[in-house]
Image (cartoon, grey):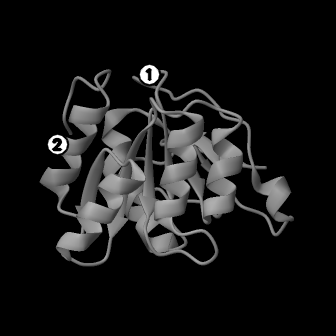
Amino acid sequence: MRTFLPPDCAAQPVPEPVVALPCNVVPMVSSASPSARVRASEPCSAGANDEWVLVVDDDLATRRLLAQKLCPFSINIDYAASGQQAIALTSTKPYACIFVDVTMPGMDGYQVCKQIKSNRPSTRVVMLTHGDDPFDDIKARRAGCDAHLTRPIDEAQLVNTVVRLLPVVSKTP
């Protein structure tokens, strides 16, 4: 595996489907099997804290967008492309916050949230939905989520959510 430090977070590609690297370390993903794609974390060069966040979305563009928006907080980020991968990762590491897409093949975001909350009630879960349907918010709350963001993701709302749910994050980008 080759890694490099990008000049800024905006230029950072997000690997797929699962990677355990701080935001400023970018792996070059090989064509290896999905189990071989999980990488060991490497220290951030500046300002990293001990918080880990998981971004769960089957859409690579959304994972890239969230990586770019979360990078200035100097938090460590893991990525999962499915609910099953997310559940597997949560059994190996305590995440402070998990961003979960509602519509994914297999296990949907509501099922992922319920399972995460039943195993780790203190983990914060943010549901990502595609519409502004008021029932999405009700279903998300019933599943146990702590916040609900609609797409397109409003940057100010995302920043406010991160600051509110991750007390260790003391600065805003």
For disc 1, the marked residue is 49
Residue 152 in the figure: left or right of residue 139: left
Can you give x and y, in whole percent of width and height, for residue 93 in the image?
64, 32
Q: How far is mark 2 from mark 1, CA to CA?
A: 19 Å
Residue 150: numbered disc:
none
Lateral position of residue 148 relative to residue 44, left or right: left
Residue 102: x and y in percent read 43, 69
* Disc number lying in front (2 or 1): 2
Q: Residues within 10 Å of mark 2 (few under 14, many from 20)?
A: few
Q: Is residue 135 above or below residue 91?
A: below
Whether residue 53 is visible, yes or no, is yes
Q: Residue at x 62, y 53 (%)?
A: 86
> What residue sits right under mark 2 in the picture?
160
Q: For this rendering, which residue is in front, 47 or 51?
A: 51
Q: Is residue 131 above or below residue 96?
A: below
Report helix, strand or loop for mark 2: helix
Q: Which residue is at 84% across, 55% downward?
A: 36
Going by the image, does 169 lie left or right of 122?
left
Considering only order in the chain, which callout, 1 or 2, is on the residue closer to the N terminus? 1
